[in-house]
Image (cartoon, rainbow, N blue to C red):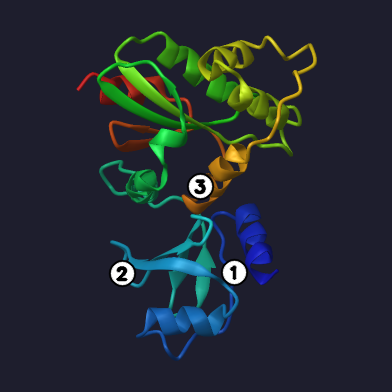
Amino acid sequence: MLRFSLLLLCVFLPLGACAIQPQESSDNPAAALSSAYPKLQYQLLNPTPVSGVYEVVTENEEVLYFVPASGHIFTGDLWSADGHNLTAENRSQRMTAKLKLFPLDKAIKIGDGPNQVVEVTDPDCPFCRHSSDYFAGRDDVTRYVFLFPLGQVHPNAIAKSRFILAADDPEQAYEDVFSGMYDHQPVPDAPDDGRLQLFRDIAHKAGVNGTPHFWINGQHVTGYNPQQFDALLNK
């Protein structure tokens, strides 16, 4: 509960700080962090270009910043003077390395072009659909689709995902669903072979908590970003 309370507080105060007493162990940032926030679970603690400030990557891939000398934690994006979003760049590098977690032989394969696109997508996410339209308009990609329905946000996405996976022609079923064919009519019943749960488990392990996510020729991209898609596919 402490972790979630801390994150919620910092989200509402993105430029503020959660104040605690200064830590005597400030020369050891890991010890200072554990002492100040003993229930905060994290996977990485890295120095930043800002002296005395450390990047904390939680188990859910959320990024916090910690000041050992004072014990403060704050959130937000760290930018360089030349306009680079260092927080976003570091996150992208970490997510790029997660590509190896996805078993491509289990994915829905669409196309046979020379560019590899691995996508984590929700059938009812509007940005996922925009992205799907973009890639459908190119004949130079091979897509490996992992369905990740956000059931709490899109209640029908789970049924649509199961329908796609159980179809005799998953590629056609994918296109039908993402075109909106089943937005205003019942989704046909489909058996659950466990593959959807496998996809969700993999996505959670990779730190995915929203959609869409893409790995284009190995490079991670989050969200619908056609300019970045173009740049990576047209190299």
Whole-percent x, y for residue 60 in the image: 53, 56
Quick one: SS at disc 1? Answer: loop
Alpha carbon separation for disc pair 2 and 1: 19 Å
Which circle, 3 or 2, is nearer the viewer? 3
Q: Residue furthest left?
A: 235
Residue type beneath disc 1: Cys
The residue pinned by badge 2 equals 51
Observer-nearest of 30 and 113: 113
Q: Quadrant of residue 160?
A: top right
Alpha carbon separation for disc pair 1 and 3: 33 Å
Q: Earlier in the sequence, mark 1 or mark 3?
A: 1
Whole-percent x, y for residue 148 in the image: 58, 36
User: Residue at left 32%, top 64%?
Assistant: 50
The answer, for residue 92, to whether it is visible in the render is no
The residue pinned by badge 3 equals 202
Crowding at mark 2 (Cα within 10 Å: few <14, some 14-19, many 20+): few
Q: Is residue 209 above or below residue 181?
A: below
Q: Quadrant of the C terminus?
A: top left
Q: Quadrant of the N terminus?
A: bottom right
Quick one: SS at disc 3? Answer: helix
Alpha carbon separation for disc pair 3 and 2: 36 Å
Residue type beneath disc 2: Ser
Crowding at mark 1 (Cα within 10 Å: few <14, some 14-19, many 20+): some
Crowding at mark 3 (Cα within 10 Å: few <14, some 14-19, many 20+): some
Q: Earlier in the sequence, mark 3 or mark 2?
A: 2
Q: Is residue 162 left or right of residue 208?
A: right
Q: Earlier in the sequence, mark 2 or mark 1?
A: 1
Q: Is residue 202 above or below residue 24?
A: above
User: Residue at left 27%, top 26%?
Assistant: 232
The residue pinned by badge 1 equals 18
